[in-house]
Image (cartoon, rainbow, N blue to C red):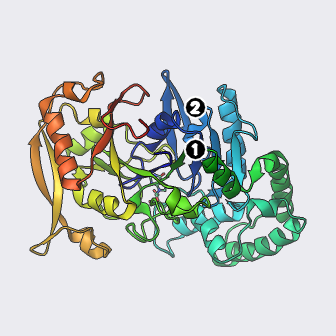
Amino acid sequence: MSNLVIVGTQWGDEGKGKIVDLLAEYSDFVVRFQGGNNAGHTMVVDGEQFISHLVPSGILQKKVCIIGNGMVVDPGVLLDEIDYLKGKGVQIDPKVLLISQKAHVIMPYHKALDAAREGCGKSKKIGTTGRGIGPCYEDKAARRGIRFIDLLDEDFESNVRAIAEEKNFYLSKFHELDTIDVDELINTYKSYRDRLAPHITDISVVLDQAVRSGNRILFEGAQGTHLDIDHGTYPYVTSSNTISGNACCGTGIGPKRIDHIIGIVKAYTTRVGEGPFPTELFDATGDFLQEKGAEFGATTGRRRRCGWIDIVMLRNAVRLNSLTGLALTKLDVLGGLDEIKICTSYRYRGETIEHFPVSLNVLAECEPVFETIAGWKEDISGIRHVEDLPENTRRYLRTIETLTETPVDLISVGPGRNETIFMNHPFQ
Ligand code: IMP
C-alpha cells in the first residue's frame, strides 16, 4: 500500500491536519487537491502550534508538498504563510513546495464579491469564510479564471484588465461598492508572480514520476464530505468536490493509483456556517463539547455548532468516499459525560430514514434516533494502547465500527503527534 487519501467525513474541522501531519512521516509527497484558504489545519509539534491554510500539512515532516490543480489559491496569503512558516524554522523552497500550473488564482474581486454577496441580503447567506473561494471557482467554470500558468503569460495584463473591468461593473452597479484599482492589482500580482514563479510546475508529471519511482503519496482533503459541492448539504456547501474521487481530478493522477482512503471522524459532530444539522445540541452538553473541544474555526474564529455523532452521515461518507478505514479524533473530549448518544437513523413524518436525505427541507425536519451508551469519567489522553481504554470507550468504538461497517484504524486522544492510538497502521 503506498498512496493514501485522507478526507473529512462530516462538515470539516474533523482534525485532518494532525492526522495528515502524523501520516506524512511515512509518505514522500503530500498533495492538496481542492479548496483554498477557507481551510485551516492545526498541528501541534512538541507543544508548539502551527496553523496552515494553503501549504499542505506535510510541510512540518519535510516532505515534498504540492498545491494541486483543484485548488484555488490566494497568492498573497500563500506568501504570508510561507513567511510565517519560515519564521518558525520550517524549510520552504521550490524543491519542497510545488504549485500546479493549473491551480486557479484568487483575485481581489473574488474576495470583494464573496463579502458583498454574503452581506447584501439580496442572496441566500451561506456563511462562507469570505476568502473568495466560491467566486474563484465560478470563474474557473465560466472559463474566466486566472491560473498560475496565466500569471507567467505575456497576455496576463490584458487578460486581467478585461476580467477586472467586468467585475468592477458588478461591484459598483449591482452592489454599489467601491471598485478595484486594476493597475494596483496588476502590479501586486506581478510581484506575487516573481516570488512564486520558481514553485510553479506541471504536478501531474511530477506525481507520475514519483509513483513510478516507488514513492508514497498522501492526498490531503480539506473541508468535509457534507460540504462537497455535489454531495453535501447544497447550497450550504463549499464550491469544490471534497470527496476522495477528487484526489484524482484535483491533481492529475488516475484512480488506479489510490490504495487506501481514510475518513476522519470527530467523536462528535460540529458545523460552522449555516445549514441543517440533525444532531445539533442546544443545551449544556453542546456547551460542554464546544468548550472542552475548543470548537472555534481555525480560519474565521467562529464558534462551531456542536452535536452528537451521526451514523447516517458517516455511512453516507463511507459510501461516497469508498472509505477503507476511519480515524476517530478528539475522543478525549467526550470523557466526563454520564452518557453518550449515537444517532443511528432519522425519523421523518413517522418514517425511519436510513440514508442521508438530499432535500434540505426533509433533512431540516429529521429527528435523530439515538442509541445511548454509558460514558466514561477517566481522562484518556495519556492512553496509547486500545486495550488500556475504559470498557465504555471501547464499546463506543465497537458501536461505530459495527454501524459504519468500517474499521477504526486510529484514534486521536489529544492534539500532539504522540497522543494517538494505532489499531491498524495504514503504512505498516
Ligand atoms: P466557503 O468555502 O468559504 O465558500 O464557505 C462555504 C461553507 O463551507 C461555509 O459554511 C463555511 O463555513 C464552510 N467551510 C469552508 N471551509 C471550511 C473548513 O475548512 N471547515 C469547516 N467549514 C468550512
Horizontal and vertical percent position of residue 58: 57, 38
Q: Earlier in the sequence, mark 2 or mark 1?
A: 1
Q: Residue at x 63, y 50 (%)?
A: 212
Q: Residues within 10 Å of mark 1 (few under 14, many from 20)?
A: many
Q: Residue at x 75, y 77 (%)?
A: 166
Callout 2 amino acid: Gln
| Quadrant for the C terminus in the image | top left
Horizontal and vertical percent position of residue 120: 54, 70
Q: Residue pushed farthest right?
A: 154
Q: Nearer the viewer, residue 383 or 135?
A: 383
Q: Nearer the viewer, residue 329 or 426?
A: 426
Q: Seen in the image, is 236 located left or right of residue 276?
A: right
Q: Is residue 66 above or below residue 345?
A: above
> Marks 1 and 2: in contact by CB < 8 Å?
yes
Q: Is residue 178 above or below residue 405?
A: below
| Dot label at residue 30 | 1
Q: In what element is the residue under mark 1?
A: strand
Q: Seen in the image, is 77 located left or right of residue 151?
A: left
Q: Is residue 249 visible?
A: yes
Callout 1 amino acid: Val
Q: Determine which residue is flagged by label 2.
A: 61
Q: Is residue 32 above or below residue 363?
A: above
